[in-house]
Amino acid sequence: MNAILKETRKNKKLSASELQIIKKKVEQRQQLVNNITSQINILDNQIKTTQQSITESYRSLEILKQNYAYMLRYAQKHRSAMDRLLFIFAAKDYHEAYQRYVFFRRYASLQRSQMAKIENKTIELSSMTDDLLNQKKSQSKLLNQEKVNTANLNKERQQQEKLVNNIKKQESQLAKEIKAKEAKKKRLQQQINAAISAEVKKQAKIAETKRKNASSANATAKKESSTEKKTPEKKTYVMAATPKEEALSKSFETNKGRLPWPVGKGVIVSGFGKHPHPDIAGVEIENLGVDIRTTKGASVKAVFEGEVCKVFPGPNGNKIVIIRHGEYMTVYTNLASVSVSDGAKVSTGQTIGTIATNENGESEMNFQVRQGVKCQNPSVWLKR
């Protein structure tokens, strides 16, 4: 975010855009502060528990010391061998006599052993408490640092809000510019939708032909009787023509929420769906993907293995790449250069091109995920 923010600040015209990134940065910084606070609370509870354990250990130790002292006094009074023998032979039976004998032999040793164990445990608990206190101090320092950073970011945000308020006088002009930008996006989206629809029809036709051929090959097989148990219906992938493509579709589905980002450094500046513009009142944005702001000249990478089904120029001349992953497709827009072509096989994380930077210094791409023609929210597919 710092790198993106540094580039954005070079153009003073983008104060609203800069504010948008700072808001994202403040939000994530605040989450970090909250996490550190939570860790400190956990440490506090651990310290209290440890201190309680130490107190209980000391109490047990004192009881054992008292018992041991009582035993020593008793042994001092009956220290002669005759007294011990009389005590043993005074037992009711042989078993009790043996137990008394064992008592003399092991009691003192057992008490000293138990006392030593508790003393060692007390030392261990004391050491743990020291470690936890040191960790708490470290976490407190981190919390203070994060509070300072958040305060600084809030100051920056206030400064940017002042700039935004200053350009509110030109809000109508800005609204026109945004609407013009949205119109270009619609033309771009029409191109993408047309390309995806064509690919869906093409792959669906191939898959249907293969299914018909397979059905014809099995036409001579015995028909299932009415009493025969029906097997559960297998999920049909309209665009997956081969078992390999079906497996690829399933693999893509299982990686929901774990797909790598298409750029190394980036922040989502416009989310999926319809929503009002964050700075200009009365302007609504419709996004079939997510807009990701990144650094100048950043590499764009495939988020999953698949096949490039279409590479074509958009309305502004920048390239668009569509990659098919069985039943699913991912879309990468606003590429200045492309290193793949139609039909190329790509692997996860493979570079497919570089991002373009507009006249305002923005390096931004629109990333989409489709299941056939159905739009998916990319935010829930990408790794958080």
Image (cartoon, helix red, strand yellow):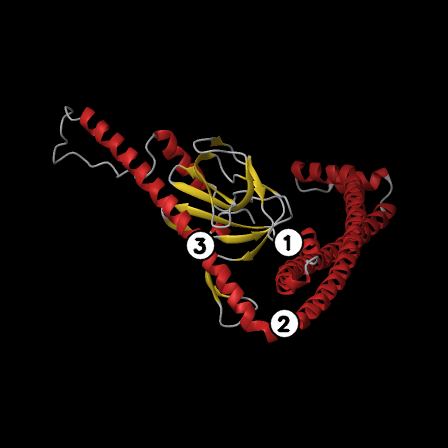
Residue hosting label 3: 288
Viewer-side residue, 185 vs 108: 185
N-term mark: 3 or 2: 2
Separation of disc 3 and disc 1 at Cα? 24 Å
- Say if 52 sits above or below 226 in the image: below
Residue 361, numbered circle: 1
Q: Secondary structure at mark 1?
A: loop
- Say if 289 sits above or below 26 in the image: above
Q: Amino acid at mark 2?
A: Ile
Q: Nearer the viewer, residue 102 or 125?
A: 125
Give me the C-alpha separation between circle 3 and circle 2.
29 Å
Q: Name which residue type carries label 3.
A: Leu
Mark number, residue 167 = 2
Point 52% across, 45% down: residue? 318
Mark 2 crowd level (few <14, some 14–19, many ≥20, 10 Å Cα) = some
Q: Indicate the quadrant where residue 41 lies.
A: bottom right
Q: Residue at x 56, y 49 (%)?
A: 384
- Tell me what residue is drawn at x 42 percent, y 47 percent: 192
